[in-house]
Image (cartoon, grey):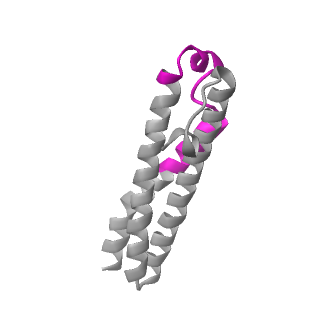
Amino acid sequence: MTALRVAAMSPLTLVAFVACVWGVHEWVSPPFTDAEIRDSFVDTWEPSAWMTLLALSVLGCIFLVSLVALAFARQRPTRVMTIATVTLSIGGALLSYRNHVALTERTTALTGQTFGRFHGLL
């Protein structure tokens, strides 16, 4: 039964891991140039904000599912997998939000456009 539970958590762990890798990639190489942001923040900042909301929603769901699974996990391999998933989902969400904040600040500096609460996510 432990192998089945670990296998069931594997896709969630993989998604959270990919989110972390993608977040580090965006941190190292920002997705848009200054010229692209100046030309149209609607084509740069807005799609990025929607993708950030999607990523935060998915990672939040993964986090909650992992917490529920952690509460019911009895064997060590299952607990290790769920703790890894919780940690990766938190890391992915933090990286995603950090990249959104950086892009929002760049967009504000380049265009003068101000954004609402949570850097325009609400």
Left or right position of 77 against 111: left
Q: Residue at x 53, y 39 (%)?
A: 120
Q: Residue 66's x, y, as percent?
A: 42, 69
Q: Quadrant of residue 53?
A: top left
Q: Which residues are magenta?
A: 18-42
Q: Is residue 43 magenta?
A: no
Q: Residue furthest bottom?
A: 74
Give above or below for 9 relative to 41. Answer: below
Q: Residue 101's x, y, as percent?
A: 62, 41
Q: Residue 48's x, y, as percent?
A: 49, 33
Depth check, front residue: 9 or 115: 115
Q: Residue 14's x, y, as percent?
A: 43, 55
Dominant SS type (magenta) = helix
State the count of labels.
Answer: 0
**Image quadrant where one finds the N terminus:** bottom left
Give above or below for 74 relative to 32. Answer: below
Q: Residue at x 67, y 22 (%)?
A: 110
Left or right position of 37 against 19: right
Q: Residue at x 50, y 74 (%)?
A: 80
Depth check, front residue: 71 or 114: 114
Give above or below for 100 relative to 114. Answer: below
Q: Residue at x 39, y 59 (%)?
A: 61
Give above or below for 74 relative to 116. Answer: below
Q: Is residue 33 magenta?
A: yes
